[in-house]
Amino acid sequence: MSANPVLYPLDYPADAQDGELLALDTAILTLRVQARDTALKQSHTRRIGGQNAIQVQNKVSKARPVPMPLTQVGLRSIPAVGLQGTMAILAGGRGHGVSTDTIAFYYSNESAKPTGVRLSEVRNYMGTIGDSSAGIFAGGIAASGLSATMDEISYPKMTTRRLGASLTLARFATAGVGNKDIGVFLGGAKRTDGGMVTNGEVYTYATGTIQATSLITARQAAHNGTSNPTDGFIYGGSSDGFVGLQPFTSIERYNFATRTSNAVGAALSVPHIVHAAFGNKLKGYVAGGLGFVATVSRLTYSGLTVATVGNLPEGKVCADGASTNYSGYTFGGDLASTNWQGTRTIDKLGFASEAIARLGSLLPTPMADQGAVSDYGAGF
């Protein structure tokens, strides 16, 4: 007797004869073969369909036996996501006394925390530049006098190192601008009692080399200018000394390709001296300044027009600024009520609405005259 009654007991009547059992065996075998063949045919049909689809795709994309870039589908290129900015680094300043600590400000949750890394020496009124991987703090007033040295802080590694290159002239209150290839330090004071200069340096990130350049007008313009990919802009400042009794309302544009400076026709409506500066690819902003100015001014790059957009929550001097693609921030600084001891406050300006507000979060310690860098830059 067949083994099928064990495998399919319900298929076999109890009184079935051998001939009937053979017929049932044959029927079941036929069903098995048909089911197997049907499954194979379906699988083969799917495989043929897949092969045809791949052949069509290969004709369109001219596929090669190497992976295509993630930014390309077929012959169509997809623009890479623009740099938005993830963090700013604050370092030095008077609020730290003789400290060399650094602080990270994270744009995602708008919080500030100590980084655990340090500058190589005490600095305030320094110039800062940087690309999307590292920021550089240069010059300033150090414990031993005016400095020409340069410290670099890496964003992804959060490490610091003293660079081999130095400013061509030790000074403080120099302003930094730049794009993805070069950073430029411009102007400043060569003595703590004044001595404004037009001196400047171009630092090339790829080679780590310094070349001399200059501004048109000798000025101190502490806490940096703003940049787009082609030009940097230096705002206001003073010509007569650290106290700024002869303030400028003029703006100079520094072209990164020609490495020359020229005056912008438009002028600031109020002097900004020792101010905060920030911006994106389209606009640059300066906020506050000597005399506890609260005004925020805007330079629109496309037409080189200047406008006043509002006021900080309170007048502030000796703050510094940094930005993302969407917002600019001012950090610390001195208020009329704090007796030049710095503050922990952070103010924010949204580029789309130009609304200005005080954040609820604070810096870990009071800061003023610190340097600030950002991995956004001006979108580089």
Image (tube, rainbow, N blue to C red):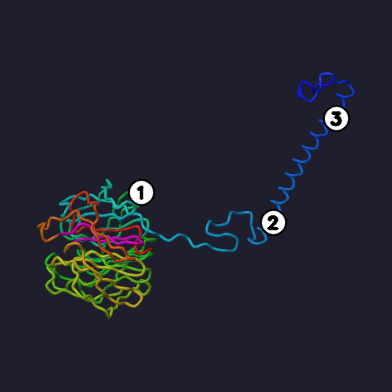
> Quadrant location of the C terminus?
bottom left
Examine the image and state in which quarter residue 239 appears: bottom left
Examine the image and state in which quarter residue 21 appears: top right
Circles 2, 3 touching at the beta carbon (< 8 Å): no
> Quadrant location of the N terminus?
top right
- The residue where tag 3 is placed is 26
Q: Earlier in the sequence, mark 1 or mark 3?
A: 3
- Image mark count: 3
Q: Nearer the viewer, mark 1 or mark 3?
A: 3
- Whole-percent x, y for residue 192 in the image: 13, 64
Q: Nearer the viewer, mark 2 or mark 1?
A: 2
Kind of residue at badge 1: Lys
> Considering the numbered disc 2 on the image, is that residue within a helix, a strand or a loop?
helix
Q: Which mark is residue 137?
A: none
- Whole-percent x, y for residue 191 in the image: 14, 66
Quick check: is 321 in the magenta stretch?
yes
> Considering the numbered disc 1 on the image, is that residue within a helix, a strand or a loop?
loop
Q: 250 or 31: nearer the eye?
A: 31
Q: Which mark is residue 55?
A: 2
Mark 2 Cα shell of 10 Å, populated few (<14), some (14-19), many (≥20): some
Kind of residue at badge 3: Thr
Q: Which mark is residue 157?
A: 1
**Residue at x 26%, y 61% (from the top left corner):** 321
Residues in magenta? 317-334
